[in-house]
């Protein structure tokens, strides 16, 4: 690709990125609906210091995590692209709306 | 008996190798490495400017190390993270996980939220 063409595409890419971000904001989930769904998560993510059985490591802190990342992670579990068995099972049981609601609630939490 | 001796010797060797493999790495070297991470995850590890990337600050250090191992092995697939993780030594993984895990941040478990 020539430099000129590449330079010409950059603003286009920026524009696309901007409109995608705006659309994502508009489609953000409902934190109140997410709050109810998150009861299930608390079984593992709601116990301070709780460890994954094998291999041994702490299950991650998810309160206050970024919205888009949470949506991406849960969607990857739902599709089987991330392999943790328990999280895959959870992901498969969630609709896309559930996922955005959960992400909206978790990302809204502050310490 | 001979076999047991051989097995013991082998075990001792692998232990010795393991200990030698545990290279130490300076705090300065880890901070220099962390600058690469900062481009997406933020200087303070909070990824406040880019919500598509996870906050690392205050995450459990062993979960961060686990994630880096999974990116390195390909068990977790992300083109950007694979590119970085495959270049990291075990000591660098542990050092970076420890560094970001100890930065102050928003992350918490859910025990305080119900």
Image: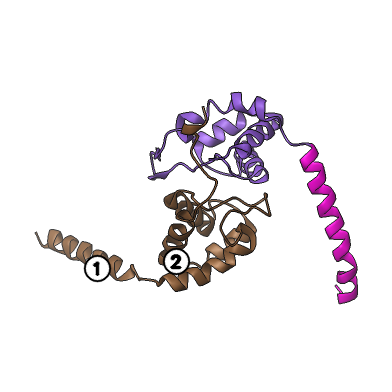
**Residue at image coords 55%, 46%:** B106
- The spot of residue A88 in percent (x, y) is 56, 36
User: What span is colored magenta in the figure?
Assistant: A1-26
**Residue at image coords 49%, 43%:** A60
Report in which chain the residue with disc 1 lies: B
Q: Which residue is mark 2?
A: B92
**Residue at image coords 38%, 45%:** A56
Is the magenta region chiefly helix, strand or loop? helix
**Residue B101 against residue B88 in the figure, above or below:** above
In which quarter of the view is residue B98 placed? bottom left
Residue lying at the far left of the rendered structure = B1
In which quarter of the view is residue A82 placed? top right
Q: What letter labels the chain drawn in purple?
A: A
Q: What letter labels the chain drawn in brown?
A: B
Colouring scheme, one of rainbow, by chain, secondary structure, one colour: by chain
Depth check, mark 1 against mark 2: the one in front is 2
Spatial CA span between label 1 and label 2: 20 Å
Specify few, some or many for label 2: CA neighbours under 10 Å numbering under 14, 14-19, or 20 or more. Answer: many
Report in which chain the residue with disc 2 lies: B
- The spot of residue A61 in percent (x, y) is 50, 42
In the shown orientation, is residue B85 left or right of residue A12?
A: left
The circle drawn on residue B16 is: 1
**Residue at image coords 24%, 68%:** B16
A53 magenta-colored? no
The circle drawn on residue A23 is: none
N-terminal-most mark, 1 or 2: 1
């Amino acid at each position: 690709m020539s430099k000129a063409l590449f330079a010409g595409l950059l603003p286009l890419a920026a524009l696309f990125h901007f409109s995608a971000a705006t659309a994502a904001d508009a489609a953000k989930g409902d934190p109140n609906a997410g709050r109810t769904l998150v009861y299930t998560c608390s079984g593992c993510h709601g116990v301070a210091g709780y460890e994954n059985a094998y291999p041994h490591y702490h299950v991650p802190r998810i309160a206050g995590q970024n919205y888009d990342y949470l949506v991406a992670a849960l969607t990857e579990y739902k599709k089987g692209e991330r392999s943790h068995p328990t999280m895959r099972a959870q992901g498969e049981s969630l609709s896309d709306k559930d996922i955005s609601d959960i992400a909206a609630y978790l990302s809204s939490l502050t310490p | 008996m001979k076999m047991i001796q051989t097995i013991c010797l082998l075990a001792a060797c692998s232990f010795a190798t393991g200990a030698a493999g545990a290279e130490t790495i300076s705090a300065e070297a880890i901070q220099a490495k962390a600058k690469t991470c900062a481009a997406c995850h933020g200087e303070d590890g909070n990824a406040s400017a880019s919500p598509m990337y996870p906050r690392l600050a205050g995450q459990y250090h062993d979960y961060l190390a686990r994630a880096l191992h999974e990116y390195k092995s390909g068990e977790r697939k992300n083109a950007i993270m694979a590119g970085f993780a495959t270049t990291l030594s075990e000591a660098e993984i542990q050092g970076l996980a420890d560094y970001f895990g100890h930065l102050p941040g928003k992350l918490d478990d859910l025990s305080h939220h119900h």
